[in-house]
Amino acid sequence: MNDSSSARRDGIFISYRRDDARGASGRLYDWLRIAFGRDKVFRDVASIGPGKWRQRIDEALAASAVCLPVIGTRWCDDNNGTRLTQDDDMVRHELITALSAKGLTLIPTLVEGARVPPREKLPVELHDLLEWNAYPLSEEGWEDDVRRLLAAVSNSSGQLVAGDVDTLLIRVREAEARMRQLEQDKHLQADQLHALTETIAALT
């Protein structure tokens, strides 16, 4: 692995557990690559390619200025908490490597209502993760939460956020609101048809 003092760090590394926050980390990956460029963001499914996974992860972390551990509600449950103590666990390896790297900022990112894991749930090697400020991403405040997170990533990595991100966030919010309205209208129409059918049946 390259020494952080001799290699430029400007990448963004997403660490997540697939049975915990695969969807949320994918959504976050989309916004990060829109904001900073696809070549600056590493997420294993999209970026790891051929080769030995530890080597590829070590190389990606060596080139990264920011690591975002994406933490959902199952990240440290009874099953996954045990995996964090095992040397062959990918998430454990990613975080231990990130925590030991100089010049790398960690931004724990809480999704799907998750909270910061309690200290006693983590192996001692990962206790330093709790020293970093966590950023929640909620469905209700997604637009503002993403803006805040992108600003933190920008400040830590030195990468500028693309100028059209704000416009895209607003358009996505409007599109989602319109979709919810259409779904509500559809349900209302279905309820009306059901009531009409019942009325006709009663009259009959």
Image (cartoon, grey):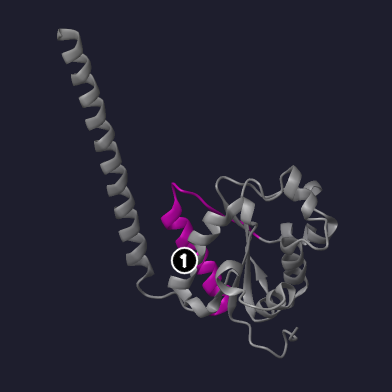
The residue type indicated by label 1 comes to Asp
Q: Is residue 71 visible?
A: no
- Indicate left or right for 187 with 33 as reference: left
- Indicate left or right for 30 with 117 as reference: left
Image x and y of residue 116, in percent: 67, 50
Residue farthest along the bottom direction in this orientation = 6
Q: Is residue 192 above or below residue 152?
A: above
Image x and y of residue 149, in percent: 52, 63
Q: Residue at x 45, y 66 (%)?
A: 31
Q: Is residue 181 above or below residue 53?
A: above
Q: Is residue 171 visible?
A: yes
Q: Nearer the viewer, residue 8 or 18?
A: 18
- Image quadrant in which you'd find residue 133: bottom right
Q: Which structural element holds mark 1?
A: helix
Quadrant location of the C terminus?
Answer: top left
Q: Nearer the viewer, residue 144 or 28?
A: 28
Q: Nearer the viewer, residue 69 or 200?
A: 200
Is 138 magenta? The answer is yes
Q: Is residue 87 above or below residue 56?
A: above
- Indicate left or right for 195 with 155 as reference: left
Image x and y of residue 130, in percent: 73, 57
Which residue is identified by label 1? 30
Dominant secondary structure (helix, strand or loop) of the stretch shown in magenta: helix
- Indicate left or right for 174 with 89 as reference: left
Residue farthest along the front direction in this orientation = 204
Image x and y of residue 60, in percent: 65, 78
Is 132 magenta? The answer is no
Magenta region, residue range: 133-158
For label 1, the crowd category at 10 Å Cα-Cα, with few meaning under 14, some 14 to 19 and many 20 or more, is some
Q: Residue at x 75, y 83 (%)?
A: 1
